[in-house]
Image (spheres, coloured by chain):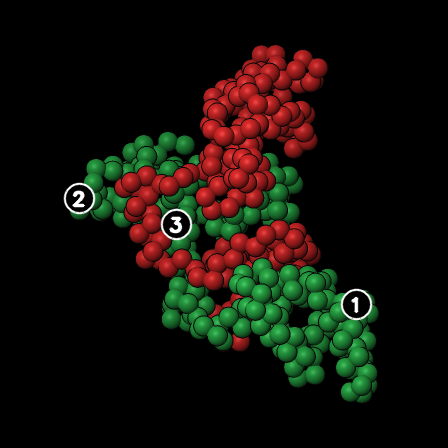
Amino acid sequence: MPDTLPPALARLLAAADTGERDNAWSGFVAAFTDSMLRVCRSLGGDHDAVMDRYAFVLEHLEQDDYRRLRAYQRPDAGEFGLWLIVVTRRLCLDHYRGRYGRTRGTASTGSDPNPGRSSRRRLVDLVSSEIDPENVAAPTGTRPDTELALAEQLRALAAALERLEPRDRLLLRLRFSEELPAREIADLMRFPTLFHVYRRLDLVLRVLRGSLRKAGMEGADP
Amino acid sequence: MTKHGTDAPQPHLEVHEVVAYLEGKLMAAARARLEGHLSDCDQCAAEIAAVMRLRARRPARFRWLTIGTAAAAAAIVGAVLLGPPHRRPVTSGPDVERTPGSAQVIAVVSPAEGAIVAGHPVLRWQAISRAPSYRVTVTREDGDSVWAVSTSDTTVTIPAAVALTSAGRYYWYVDALLPDGASFSSGLHEFKTAP
C-alpha cells in the first residue's frame, strides 16, 4: 500500500456503512473533479460528450465497491493524482470503444497478428518524411520503376529502424509521432539535458540516412 | 503488463507501470523493458505522451483514429513523389508546442551550421511575412541561456557585453509568433567560438 492515501480516498475506502460511504464518495468527487474533468475534456467533443464521459468515469469508479480505486492500494502505486489521470483516461477510452467500437488500425484490435510490426511500419512512414526522402528518391513521376524504388527505400528504412535500439525507436516515436517537446522527452527518458535529446535524435537520423546510403540510395546525405 | 480497457487482447502497460515510468521510479532493467514495449506499441506510447500533457496541463493532442498503414503509406508515397507538405529540421527546435498547420520553419542564413566564428557572431535568418517580431535566444551547451532579444529585424549581432568563452559551443534559435497564433521556429542551430 502507498505510504499515505489521499484523505478523501482513505475516508472512502474505510467507510463502514452506506451513509458514510455516500458522504465519502461525495467528498472524493469534490476533491478530484477538476482532475477527472480535465482528462475527460482532453479527449475532445462538446460539453455533452464530455459530461457523458465524466458520468461514465464516475459510474465505473464507484462500481463493485470502488474496485478500481481499491486497486491503488499497492506499494508501487505512485502518486495518486497521476494514477487517477491514467485510470480516468483509460475509462474514457473504454467509453469511446463501448459507443463506437474499435477503429481499424488501432494497435490493439486483435485483428493484427503482429501489432509491433504494424507499429514499426507507421514509424517508418513518419521517419521517412523526417529524413527527407525526396532526396533519396528519384521523383520522376509514378512510373512503376519509381514506385519500385520507393518501396525499396521504405523497406531499407524499415530494416534500419529494426536494427535500432528500442530506446532510439522510442525516442523517434515520442518526438515525431507524439510530438513531445524535447524537454519532456529528456525528463521522461532520463536524458541529462534537452540538448542530449537533440544530439541523440541527430545521431539516430544520421544512422538511418547512412543505412539508406549503404542500401544504395543516392543522395541520402546527412 | 495487461490490456488497455476491457477487451484489448494485446498486453499493454499496467497503470502502475505507466505511473512509475512517468515518475522516473523504475530501476534500469524495468525501465529498459518498458521502453522496449513503448518503442513498438502505439497505444502505450500515446498514453504516456497524453498523460505527460495532462500532467503538464497542456492542450491535448488526441487522435481517436490511429492512422492506418495504407493511409500512412499513401501519405509517404505522396510526400516522396510530390514533396512533403512541410518538414521540420533534423534538430527540431526549442520546446514550442506544434499544432497542425503551424509547424513552420524559419530558415537560418548564417552562421552556417556548426561554423567556427571569431568574436561575436551576426545571426541572420529569412523573414517570415506578417511576423511582427522575432525572439532570438542563444544558449550554452548545457542549455543555460546566454542572451535573448526581441527584434523586428532579421539580423542581430550578439553584443560584446555577452561573454562567449573561446572554443565554446553555443546553440541559438529564432521564434516568431504571428497575430493569428501561428508559430514559427528555426529549430536549434549551433556555432562554435574560435579557440
When the figure is inspected, residue A140 is found, relative to residue B140, above or below; the finding is: below
Q: Quadrant of the N terminus of chain B?
A: bottom right
* Residue A76 found in image quarter: bottom right
Write down the chain letter for disc 3. A
- Sequence-first tag of 1 and 3: 1
**Labels 1 and 2 positioned on one and the same chain:** yes
| Tint of chain A | green
Q: Residues within 10 Å of mark 2 (few under 14, many from 20)?
A: few
Question: Which percent across, then down, holds residue B43?
Answer: 50, 62
Q: CA distance from mark 1 to mark 2?
A: 65 Å
Q: Which residue is identified by label 1?
A: A6
> Which tag is nearer the camera, tag 1 or tag 3?
1
Q: Which quadrant of the figure has residue A146?
A: top left
Q: Residues within 10 Å of mark 3 (few under 14, many from 20)?
A: many
Question: SS at mark 2?
Answer: loop
**Residue behind mark 2:** A143
Indicate whether B147 appears above or below B12.
above
